[in-house]
Amino acid sequence: MRKSAQAVAAVAILISLSACATAPAPVFWEGFRDHPHGYLTKGDAPDASAFLPPPPEAGSLRQQADVETYRATRALEGSDRWRQAASDNEIETPSAPRVFDEALGVAFNPARMPSLTLLLGKMLGDLETIQTPAKQGYFRPRPFVAEPAATCFPPEPWLGRSGSYPSGHAAMGWAWALILSELAPDRADAILARGLAYGESRVICGVHYASDVEAGRLVGAAMVARLKADPTFQRDFIEARKELASARAGD
């Protein structure tokens, strides 16, 4: 009887291992065209045009400061920070949050962290819902459109036709940083610093003004606050915490 029980247990283990070995890899989106939608509907989501102040007025001291910063940061062309800013342009792909690898102390691997990957990806869908009314309503021309100069990547035509205020990248970088710092609180300082730098990269690239970036961070914080009250987001957050903890433990 004892040998029979051992045999049954061995078979069960083999079946379990076989199932794990043949389990299909997670299927992710590739970019913006097939990007997942967010957690919130338009009626549930905050409206950035309702809570953001208008962008600086033409000729105001703040607008003048924005322009001066834009001109000054053109001197960074060719530097390491310029190259990092170009790399930070990635936002739509499943692997985009890898910009936080060093801050997290672990490589962001979508296949190993499918719930976390989907959670961070869906947040971009929510961002589009939240920020679009402000981008379209204020429609502030981007720096390189108002005053052509070097940018850290060749802007596609659609970028020049979209509003500069607020910065979606700054919003996303700050929102990701807030979520990741809660998932890995012992790494919060480094994560938050990287989230700020991700937004600053837009100024260095010359595709946003500094005040666009600051407004974007307000949008990112508002989005996170609203998502924390969403049951589906909270469920996915719990799974994401487990995945990140496992990856950090080297399991």
Image: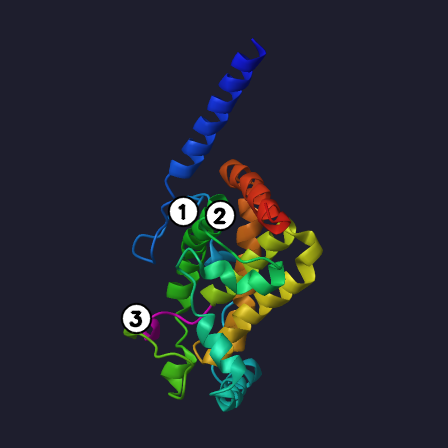
Q: Earlier in the sequence, mark 2 or mark 1?
A: 1
Q: Earlier in the sequence, mark 3 or mark 1?
A: 1
Q: Is residue 150 magenta?
A: no
**Marks 3 and 1, how far apart at CA:** 23 Å
Rendering coords of residue 135 (x, y %) = 41, 65
Front position among marks 2 and 3: 2
Q: Secondary structure at mark 3?
A: helix
Q: Are marks 3 and 1 in contact (CB under 8 Å)?
A: no
- The quarter of the image holding the N terminus is top right
Residue 152, position as x, y percentages in the image: 42, 81
On screen, residue 176 above or below 74: above
Tag 2–tag 1 contact (CB < 8 Å):
no
Colour theme: rainbow
Helix, strand or loop at mark 1? loop
**Circle 1 Cα neighbour tier, 10 Å, few/some/many (<14 / 14–19 / ≥20):** few
Q: Amino acid at mark 2?
A: Arg
Q: Nearer the viewer, residue 197 or 20?
A: 20
Disc 1 residue type (three-letter): Lys
Q: Which is more toward the observer, 21 or 116? A: 21
Residue on which disc 3 sits: 158
Which residue lies under the disc numbered 1?
A: 42
Work out which residue is located at the far top of the displayed protein and give it. Answer: 1
Q: Nearer the viewer, residue 246 or 57?
A: 246
Residue sitting at 52 percent across and 59 percent down? 219
